[in-house]
Amino acid sequence: MKNGTKAAIHRRNQLLAALEPDDYLWLEPHLEVVDLPRGKVVYQTGESLRYSYFPHDAVVSLVTVLRNGGSVEMAVFGRESVFGFVSALVTRQSFGRYVTQISGTASRVALDRLSEALEKRPKIRRVLFRYTEALLAQTLQTVACNAVHSVEARCCRAILSTRDRTDKDDIPLTHETLAEMLGVQRSTVSSVTSALQRMGLISQGRGTVRITDRTGLEETACECYHAIRQSFERLFPGGPERAEPMAKPRLAPAKNRNTAR
């Protein structure tokens, strides 16, 4: 694969695209493109982390598995994100189960190399820490959203956010996936999506949701959709910031690893 082609693939991820040329060139030799098929469990809860992943078109959920066997989504990662990074700042153990929701590709980098980047490249450190701030804002907004907004409004938010990460109006979202994202029963999702279809906002196929009225869907979604989107746009306006370098953090040291990814 030619260098220009590799760069174009890696920079499908918005964080990698936000790096300045010299920082990208420093990191690029350590990046590899990997496939993330739908349903792939990248990390299990408590598993030692070896890599961070910068998704291109894949969408990956971080879920917590409950004692009754159910699971609830805690965070979601797409082309605006990196996963396997925040956990590694402390323990190098996975907060939960990372599972591919929508298949695609990602750029993968060993955590040891990313730790080196944090120490040696202040602008890379700045981009990643600004992303961490945006992720925290997204998480807190989602907590508030789940507490006060209707399932219908939250479902619209989830559909729109997934569409933003895939750039496709035909989204491979099953009722099972939406139920996990929203923390509700599949029967509830079926009722809500049927109502949205009757309103002319979406149409449903086998394992897919098609957006037929984007404006109407945004009007039906809760305010959290725009609040979360704006938190990323505000923190990454037009590329890398030029603020003063942040204090140098270190990723947690590697421990014994029993699995290979």
Image (cartoon, rainbow, N blue to C red):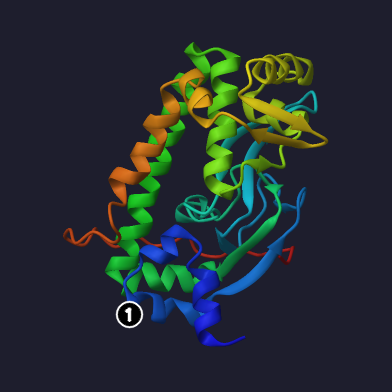
Query: In the displayed structure, does residue 242 sit left or right of residue 207?
Result: left
The image position of residue 118, as x and y in percent, is 36, 67
The image position of residue 36, as x and y in percent, is 71, 59
Q: In this view, which residue lies farthest toward the left?
A: 244
Residue in the foreground of this view, choosing between 193 and 176: 193
Residue at point 63%, 16% (across, down): 199
Number of marks in the image? Answer: 1
The image position of residue 127, as x and y in percent, is 34, 59
Q: In this view, which residue lies farthest toward the bottom?
A: 2
Residue in the foreground of this view, choosing between 230 and 218: 218
Query: In the displayed structure, does residue 60 sit left or right of residue 23?
Result: right
- Which of the 4 image quarters holds residue 23? bottom left
Quadrant where the N terminus sits is bottom right
- Which of the 4 image quarters holds residue 231? top left
The image position of residue 161, as x and y in percent, is 53, 37
Residue at point 39%, 48% (across, down): 132
Residue designated by label 1 = 22
Residue in the foreground of this view, choosing between 7 and 252: 7
Q: In this view, which residue lies farthest toward the right?
A: 206
- Give neighbour class at mark 1: few <14, some 14-19, many 20+ (Cα, 10 Å): few
Residue at point 28%, 68% (across, down): 122
- Tell me which amino acid carries mark 1: Asp
Q: Is residue 150 above or below residue 115?
A: above
- Callout 1: SS: helix
Q: Is residue 219 above or below residue 166?
A: above
